[in-house]
């Protein structure tokens, strides 16, 4: 058991040390944490098999997934803070339109490219896998985006719209994936399941939003029993952990499989709580400070879980490059077209597509489900390849887009200066 505590400590320390190097290179901290994870992973330091120093296998890294799930819960809870009614009245229509259409257009772009690749050479990729990958392409990673926004204190129309879009993206991606995966299974089995394609994804979204709303309301009621800031923060942390645990439950009603989306549940919890609680703004800030080490762990573990064995099969990088190119084009043009349709500011229209490139946890979860296909291993490996590229490059591009849009201040002004007299004994 002690090696787990040592490993957790090494991960946080390693991530923080790497962030100092990243700062010298003007790279986002999230990129540093991912690189630290790669270095501590089974393909580098972990290969030394020193107890507590890094992850000795991919299975060992995946064993820390409960920490990653908890971190995702807090990230989604924080994103819910962006869905305040005042904010939704101002740009809710734009966020919903952009969130839906950029995801749909991205799926269409990737579907066309990969289906064409299948007909050029069927041995590269099966048709069901091509269709499934198109839907997975719609998913965007909210964690990396939120970390960049927080680190550089980004603020402005682009940042506000971006945080709303990445939250909506999860629900849209879930529907697209369920429908596409159902079609893919039908192509393999020769029959289509209406329950799997229509009923289950809609039910999952409804159940997730319902559970999240309930937990947000109960959290507000419970907070009233406490008056000190520390106790209110503690009960908030406990409720998010409870919500994460409940969102991982699954059950069966007849032939219908019922489950929850962790991101949707926790996002809705944050949304309801922030809209009905008078002191939510200050409390969310305190919870965010408490969960910083957990967020570092999330990205370090994510870096350690990246499987470099995918480079052994040259077909995977080939399909992966096609996937990355057309997903990037879909995100860029999809968001640009939908922004113009909703009359967004030109600055937002020009830059939002670049900020939607990061892809990680949600896509990997979808790829895991898709492993049931005959060619499911190819789907998982292509997504792993894209995650490796997007998670290392995506945060950097997001930062540059926000700087270009004028929503990140010069780096010398992002952190508060310490008064001189505080350095004196």
Image (cartoon, helix red, strand yellow):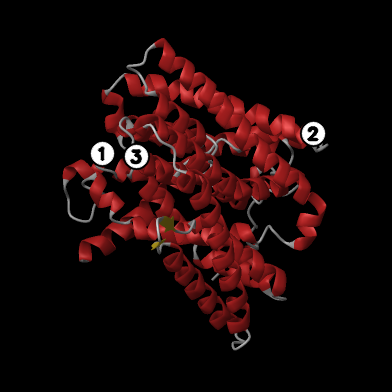
Above or below for 213 versus 355: below
Name the image quarter holding the C terminus.
Answer: bottom right
Q: Position of residue 242 (x, y in %)?
A: 46, 72
Residue at the spot 21% in from the left edge and 47% down from the top edge: 56
Mark 3, secondary structure of its residue: loop
Residue 307 in sight from this viewpoint: yes
What residue did someone put label 3 on?
Answer: 306
Residue at the spot 53% in from the left edge and 56% down from the top edge: 203
- Report the disc number at residue 341: 2
Q: Nearer the viewer, residue 85 or 388?
A: 85
Q: How many marks?
A: 3
What residue did someone put label 1 on?
Answer: 44
Q: Residues within 10 Å of mark 3 (few under 14, many from 20)?
A: many
Mark 1, secondary structure of its residue: loop
Q: Residues within 10 Å of mark 1 (few under 14, many from 20)?
A: some
Above or below for 234 versus 209: below
Query: Which of label 1 and label 2 is nearer to you?
Result: 2
Mark 2, secondary structure of its residue: helix
Q: CA distance from mark 3 to mark 1?
A: 12 Å
């Amino acid at each position: 058991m002690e090696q787990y505590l040592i490993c957790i400590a090494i991960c946080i320390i390693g991530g923080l040390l790497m962030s100092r190097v990243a700062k010298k290179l003007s790279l986002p901290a999230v990129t540093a944490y991912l690189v630290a994870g790669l270095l501590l992973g089974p393909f580098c330091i972990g290969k030394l098999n020193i107890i507590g120093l890094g992850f000795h296998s991919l299975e060992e890294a995946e064993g820390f997934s409960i920490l990653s799930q908890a971190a995702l819960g807090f990230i989604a809870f924080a994103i819910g803070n962006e869905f305040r009614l005042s904010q939704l009245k101002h740009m809710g229509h734009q966020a919903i339109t952009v969130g839906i259409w950029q995801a749909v257009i991205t799926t269409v772009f990737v579907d066309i490219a990969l289906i064409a690749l299948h007909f050029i050479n069927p041995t590269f990729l099966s048709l069901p896998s091509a269709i499934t990958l198109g839907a997975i392409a719609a998913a965007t990673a909210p964690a990396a985006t939120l970390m960049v926004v927080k680190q550089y204190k980004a603020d402005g129309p682009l940042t506000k719209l971006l945080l709303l879009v990445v939250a909506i993206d999860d629900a849209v991606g879930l529907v697209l994936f369920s429908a596409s995966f159902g079609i893919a299974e039908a192509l393999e089995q020769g029959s289509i399941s209406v329950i799997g394609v229509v009923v289950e994804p809609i039910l999952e979204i409804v159940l997730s939003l319902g559970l999240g709303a309930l937990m947000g309301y109960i959290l507000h009621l419970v907070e009233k029993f406490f008056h000190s800031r520390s106790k209110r923060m503690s009960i908030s942390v406990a409720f998010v952990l409870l919500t994460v645990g409940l969102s991982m439950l699954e059950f069966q009603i007849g032939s219908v499989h019922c489950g929850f989306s962790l991101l949707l549940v926790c996002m809705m919890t944050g949304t309801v709580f922030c809209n009905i609680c008078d002191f939510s703004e200050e409390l969310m800030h305190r919870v965010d400070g408490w969960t910083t080490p957990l967020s570092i762990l999330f990205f370090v573990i994510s870096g350690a879980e990246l499987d470099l064995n995918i480079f052994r099969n040259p077909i995977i990088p080939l399909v992966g490059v096609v996937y990355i190119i057309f997903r990037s084009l879909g995100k860029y043009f999809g968001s640009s077209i939908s922004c113009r349709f909703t009359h967004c500011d030109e600055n937002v229209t020009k830059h939002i597509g670049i900020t939607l490139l990061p892809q990680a946890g949600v896509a990997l979860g979808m790829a895991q489900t898709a492993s049931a296909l005959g060619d499911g291993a190819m789907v998982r490996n292509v997504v792993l390849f894209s995650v490796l590229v997007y998670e290392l490059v995506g945060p950097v591009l997001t930062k540059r887009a926000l700087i270009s849009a004028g929503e990140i201040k010069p780096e010398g002004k992002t952190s508060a200066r310490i008064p001189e007299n505080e350095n004196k004994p």
